[in-house]
Amino acid sequence: MYQLTLDYLLVQLNLNQDIPFLFVAVLVGLMTGYVAVVFHDAIMMLSSFCFTGLRSFGQTKVIDRYWTLLLPLIPAVGGLLVGLYNAFVVKVRPGHGLASVIKAVAQNDGVIEKKLWFHKSLTSVLSIGTGGGGGREAPMVFSLTSRIW
């Protein structure tokens, strides 16, 4: 009978060389899931505040009367805040979407400025949470690749 040891099991499963890659894959998967959930929850909290919380804020009779007029202004104010933030705080025109991630991997050996992932994530949450157009995929990929590399 064979003695069931970890070394014997690794040799039989031929995992002895793949163990480090397996741990890295699990770590990347956990980080990806965590970032995606935090990003989604931040968007939902801001969206809930902007479209539900503002309506119950202050005198409801006044806001209820003009709510249909105020509703289109929420995405406009969100876009204005994103534009002002990019112009005065970031002061660097960040790349656009996944193309900037692909460009950084191809041309800069995968180096992405660490401050840009925070700015892109924050402006994406602000834009999408206030009803602006855009997808969640590019900021999540951008933040994950800047943390990994």
Image (tube, rainbow, N blue to C red):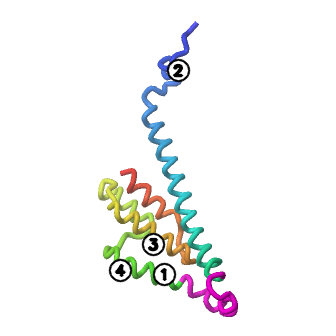
* Contact (Cβ within 8 Å) of mark 4 with mark 3: no
Q: Residue at x 60, y 75 (%)?
A: 49
Magenta run includes residue 74 = yes
When asked about the image quadrant of residue 42, the answer is bottom right
In the image, what residue type sits under mark 4? Ala
Mark 2 to mark 4: distance in Å? Answer: 58 Å
- First of labels 1, 4 by sequence position: 1
The circle drawn on residue 87 is 4
Q: How would you rate the neighbour count of disc 3 (Cα within 10 Å): few for under 14, some for 14-19, many for 20 or more?
A: many
Magenta run includes residue 67 = yes
- First of labels 3, 1 by sequence position: 1
* Image quarter in which the N terminus is found: top right
Q: Residue at x 39, y 50 (%)?
A: 148
Numbered range of the magenta stretch: 56-75
Q: Residue beneath label 1, please?
A: 79
Q: Position of residue 44 (x, y in %)?
A: 59, 68
In the image, what residue type sits under mark 3? Thr
Q: Residue beneath label 3, please?
A: 123
